Image: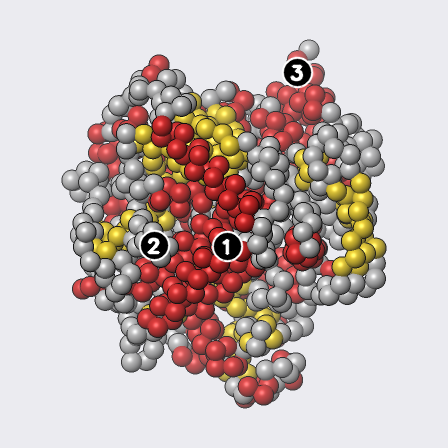
Amino acid sequence: MKFTLKIWRQTGPDAQGELVTYPIEDVTDDMSFLEMLDVLNEQLIGRGDEPVAFDSDCREGICGMCGLMISGEAHGPEVTTTCQLHMRSFTDGDTITVEPWRAEAFPIVRDLVVDRSAFDRIIEAGGFISVNTGAAPEAHSVPVPKANADRAFEAAKCIGCGACVAACPNASAMLFMGAKVTHLGETPQGQPERDSRVVSMVNQADFEGFGGCTNIGECSSACPKEIPLDVISTLNADFRSSRKSQR
Amino acid sequence: MTSLVDGLYRKGEPIRDTKAPDVDITKMWTQAKFDNRLVNPANRRKLSVIIVGTGLAGGAAAATLGEAGYNVKTFCYQDSPRRAHSIAAQGGINAAKNYNDDGDSTYRLFYDTVKGGDYRSRETNVYRLAEVSTNIIDQCVAQGVPFARDYGGLLDNRSFGGVQVARTFYAAGQTGQQLLIGAYQAMERQVAAGSVQSFTRHEMLEVIVVDGKARGIIARDMVTGEVETHLADAVVLASGGYGNVFFLSTNAMGSNVTATWRAHRKGALFGNPCYTQIHPTCIPVSGDHQSKLTLMSESLRNDGRIWVPKNREDCDKDPRDIAEEDRDYYLERIYPAFGNLVPRDIASRQAKNVCDEGRGVGPLVGDFRRGVYLDFSSALARMSEEQVSEKYGNLFDMYERITGESPYKVPMRIYPAVHYTMGGLWVDYDLETTIPGLFAAGEANFSDHGANRLGASSLMQCLADGYFVLPNTIRQYLADGPFEPVAEDAPEVIEAQQSVQQRIDTLLSINGERTVDSFHKELGHVMWEYCGMERSEEGLRKAIGLIRGLREEFWRNVRVLGAADTLNQSLEKAGRVADFLELGELMCIDALHRRESCGGHFRAESQTEDGEALRHDDEFAYVAAWGFGGDEDTGALVPTLHKEDLTYKFIELKQRSYK
């Protein structure tokens, strides 16, 4: 297969970026999208051009490190991570635009690499249960109804890749936050900090420059782990009830 | 100086652990926790610890030491601690909770782990692992880890990897992810509290050793390129395994050996480097450009039947057109008692054997077909598609996404792949390396898995080390503090900085013809061919020669573009591959000197009459702990072998059999 790639090149956070066109040949349909970029980079190095910088690590769809806007869609045309997107999803001869995640709260580091540390700071603000090591009660001392455990797990599948933010016209982080408050809020252990958690996380997200939710739903559609949209309802409900309890 | 053995290495003094208390094994850990001195809370604030790696072991240790009040700095090469490769573990985590009253106990978990490791792990450390396993589950549940539960709200268990009790706790096929998120959140809580400082996109490139003690690290900020000095009172390496020496493996792309290799070069002994686990059920290589291999859960072997064509001529046929009598269900044929459920090392080696005979299936990669069928057609005849889907649906979907083929219609193709490394830095009972003040935890140390790792035991070891073991053993070391501060311009610091800087400058100035990846792939090919599932004297000697030649060419002919003061992924890779090129040689030397078959390490010269692995306990019941050494003239590695004799007081050594 042959493709025309238009790739965002930017040498540093403050540098001017631009789309650069690279033709590529001999692509096979069993290559992942990132392996196709590996091949391009080997060719670039061969002719003395600096390779395209992009993030990836586990390459099996679970670490959340990779993430590209591919022809305007977060992680490309399939519901999966970029590392699990294969070239058979494209048509021979396609022109493919490759850009970094687009959000002010995710500044560009270089080429296709962005800084997602804002997500860590949101977790730092309250996305945890306070329990010191060694202070835990016997695991069976608190049963968790299966329905709650399953719902907590469904939300906990979030890999923190940032596709939800990149796909959202408002660059909102509410699906990411909703997943976390739902995960921890569904367990008895998460109840004591439920109110303070949601307020701190939302405040931090505002501070980082993420936008608000206007119910477009692109976040959930783009989510490679199919986190359901209703975690945002849980986030909103928790936020409302936390304000009531503070009155 | 003693003379060279086999022209390759020197004999050194024996080594042994002196830290485990001399009491009954069941009382040992309690005694150690009591014997290890305390550090009062006010003094903890004056002490600092550096932790390299933020996976299950590093993240858990950072959270726990932060809570205790020490000043902790963590370092990871990823953009967030949450991305450490622990996140990819699928199956589950073992613990001797005996919730099912099926006869499990601390002693049984201990016994299973020592036996599973083919009697090449250290009894005292493994007993402690089994002992603290139950605390891990309590801790994780309290953090909100969503383990699978039954309808009564209690935790569900399954059995795993040939063990006869159900002791594996799990969260679907994403147990590693859920446990890591728990540790990460606990660590981020300490970041908010100010006791942990997290440095992301940082790579440790050197250990600073002052007066014989580890006192800090040199790290490169991978965004700005700045070479930074970080000083502390103790250093913990929790930087994972080195399976990427094979290029293709189930490891994350960035997983590397640099942290432990740099420590090894500074004096830390490296234990059992040749012990690699080959996992039998991975998706095979599909082409020359593949960057990684994906594991398919071992549980598939419960219902899938493994076969290859009897005749080579049939290998390129559609498997559905091959008649039943022309199929060789080789595991069922050779091991009628265990069939498709033989342990990982045996299933892997037989798959390699049939492919080496030319009966492999799937695409030609090079001149070889490297794949065997894992066929669900008889399961689909026995069960409905819905039932099969309920059991394995997510795995079938994953397989289809990667290969483009539906396992409901055509048999899956699988092949063994490098998965986990049991070797690592040699540590004593306190997880301390041979450099005082330098500790190693999780996959980065060698101690608990012997020559093979059982399923669901890696997560257990990482969290045991991180949450419970290391925070209690490091006290003994830190109680000697407060330590004399090290000056930023101390000669040892300057020397470490300069060696890092010089290495970076050299890599950028060679400007040769070959890319870093091309060297890595060639090294991986040599390692897989000669130091993979099956090893022989002749092959290993050949590999050592090839690696030496490749290393010489690397430093003459590698091409690394770009600058040092910016994000430069080729430069990062070049440094790691340079270390893999040295480690690879040590792995081959270790494999060569161990003339026995053990765990995943099958020595062609050491097999029973019917081709099974043959251990030699009389000669090799020891840990091979290697000291770094090199020949300046030839560039060859000349390591020194220190043996730690393994004494089994509580478990009797037996030969394994699965027929």
Q: Are marks 2 and 1 in contact (CB under 8 Å)?
A: no
Element class at badge 2: loop
Mark 3 — on which chain does it sit?
Answer: A
x, y percentage for residue B61?
A: 42, 33
Residue under pointer 2: B633
Kind of residue at badge 1: Arg
Residue under pointer 3: A245
* Res B435 seen here: yes
Kind of residue at badge 3: Ser
Kind of residue at badge 2: Asp
- Discs 3 and 1 lie in a common subunit: no
Element class at badge 3: helix
Element class at badge 1: helix
- Which residue is depicted at the point 65% across and 29% down? A118
Instruction: Between residue B21 and residue B237, name the one nearer to us.
Output: B237
- Give the CA distance from mark 2 to mark 1: 16 Å
- Give the CA distance from mark 3 to mark 1: 68 Å
Give the number of the mark in front: 3 or 2: 2
Instruction: Between residue A48 and residue B361, name the one nearer to us.
Output: A48
Residue under pointer 1: B556
x, y percentage for residue B90?
A: 52, 52
Please rate how many residues cluster around mark 3, counting C-alpha atoms within 10 Å: few if below 14, some from 14 to 19, many from 20: few
Mark 2 — on which chain does it sit?
Answer: B
Mark 1 — on which chain does it sit?
Answer: B
